[in-house]
Image (cartoon, rainbow, N blue to C red):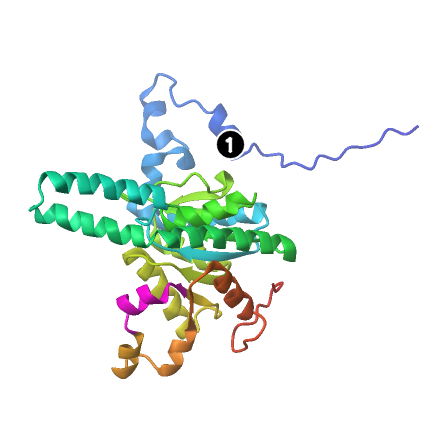
């Protein structure tokens, strides 16, 4: 019997990983100890130079992209909202603690404000529950539709945690796009570990929020939520991205925070621009609006890829 020839399929060159393992940086000579002798991709000081910023931008774009491709992530629903709206037990605990501090100094204006703020947060705790429920619905419906649709959040606590938690409740994947901040930012424990990313550049993080997005749901939030909301609305209005449903959750909050009608009256947006926004009060309503955006609307709503 003739012996079968085996043709190698791997590259004849050593991989970059192999060379990093094999290289020695200390032969006891000034030359080998010099920073210039280090492999470029193994030299952190070199990678951190200002001139290498384009390379770092590319790395931040590629790392999450390749991971999502490996996990066959086709589409996402982006869920934004405040990191300061926890579940009800946590909010009530904070309120009790601040009321106790106030009782010891009832005339202190700062303590009075802290108690008032804590009470308002307790009033908004139902948004945590709805965000969690929405994460569950999206994940379960994606399985039913046999579409690899996952929840993506900013990766932190509060509303973001709730949405990731909902996906985790029903055994689904979810993504967290964290960013280095001095406070309020650490990954919540409900993100799929392999899909938990961290960014230095806000711009690249923003791109990843929208690259696979089929909808954006904004729960009550602060500057970060407003930033992502208006960024998305601007890109849709100017037709720089395909139109997707933009859903503001909790109309009472949003009408109080933003007066879109006044913007129309002042002539800085058109009445037609108001049609870019929908409102929901329950997770079920939000999901129905997402589906409606892909079954009843035209004008840039169609997705050239596999539809829901």
Residue 116 x, y percent position in the rendering: 19, 52
- Nearest to the observer: residue 155 or residue 64: 155
Answer with left or right where residue 222 lies relative to residue 102: right
The vertical placement of 39 against 293, above or below, is above
| Viewer-closest of 109 and 254 | 109
Q: How many marks?
A: 1
Tag 1: Cα neighbours inside 10 Å, few (<14), some, or many (≥20)?
few
Q: Residue at x 56, y 45 (%)?
A: 170
Specify the quadrant of the image occupied by residue 127.
Answer: bottom left
Q: Is residue 182 visible?
A: no
Residue drawn at x 30%, y 44% as measured from the top left: 92
**Quarter of the image where the C terminus is located:** bottom right
Between 89 and 48, the residue placed more toward the observer is 89
- The residues colored magenta run 248-259
Residue 230: x percent and y percent? 34, 66
Residue 302 in the image: above or below residue 206: below
Looking at the picture, how far across and down is residue 34, in whole percent? 32, 27
Nearest the eye: 44 or 61? 61
Residue 65 part of the magenta-drawn span: no
**Quadrant of the drawing holding the N terminus:** top right
Q: Quadrant of residue 198?
A: top left
Is residue 123 shown to the viewer in this render? Answer: yes
Q: Which residue is mark 1?
A: 17
Q: Circle 1 — which element?
A: helix
Please, which residue is most extreme toward the top here?
28
Give the residue furthest to the left. Answer: 107
Left or right, residue 236 beside residue 18: left
Outermost residue, right direction?
Answer: 1
- Residue placed at 46% from the left, 45% from the top? 165
Q: Residue at x 25, y 51 (%)?
A: 119
Q: Is residue 49 left or right of residue 57?
A: left
Q: Is residue 253 magenta?
A: yes
């Amino acid at each position: 019997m003739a012996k079968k020839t085996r043709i190698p399929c791997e590259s004849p060159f050593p991989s970059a990983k192999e060379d990093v393992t094999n290289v020695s940086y200390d032969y006891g000579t000034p030359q080998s100890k010099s920073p210039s002798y280090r492999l470029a991709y193994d030299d952190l000081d070199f990678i951190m130079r200002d001139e290498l910023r384009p390379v770092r931008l590319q790395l931040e774009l590629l790392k999450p992209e390749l991971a999502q491709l490996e996990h066959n992530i086709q589409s996402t629903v982006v869920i934004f909202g405040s990191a300061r709206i926890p579940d009800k037990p946590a909010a009530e605990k904070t309120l009790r603690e601040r009321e106790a501090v106030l009782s010891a100094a009832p005339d202190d204006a700062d303590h009075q404000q802290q108690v008032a703020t804590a009470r308002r947060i307790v009033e908004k705790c139902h948004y945590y529950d709805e965000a969690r429920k929405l994460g569950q619905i999206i994940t379960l419906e994606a399985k039913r539709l046999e579409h690899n649709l996952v929840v993506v959040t900013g990766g932190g606590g509060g509303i973001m945690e709730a949405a990731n938690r909902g996906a985790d409740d029903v055994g689904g994947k979810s993504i967290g796009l964290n960013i280095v901040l001095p406070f309020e930012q650490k990954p919540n424990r409900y993100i799929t570990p392999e899909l938990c990313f961290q960014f230095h550049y806000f711009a690249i993080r923003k791109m990843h929020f929208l690259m696979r997005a089929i909808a954006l749901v904004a729960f009550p939030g602060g500057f970060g939520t407003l930033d992502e909301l208006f960024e998305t609305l601007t890109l849709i209005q100017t037709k720089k991205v395909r139109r997707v449903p933009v859903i503001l959750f909790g109309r009472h909050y949003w009408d109080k925070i933003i007066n879109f009608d006044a913007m129309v009256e002042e002539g800085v947006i058109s009445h037609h621009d108001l049609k870019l926004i929908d409102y929901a009060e329950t997770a079920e309503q939000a999901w129905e609006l997402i589906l409606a955006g892909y079954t009843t609307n035209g004008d840039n709503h169609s997705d050239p890829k596999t539809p829901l």
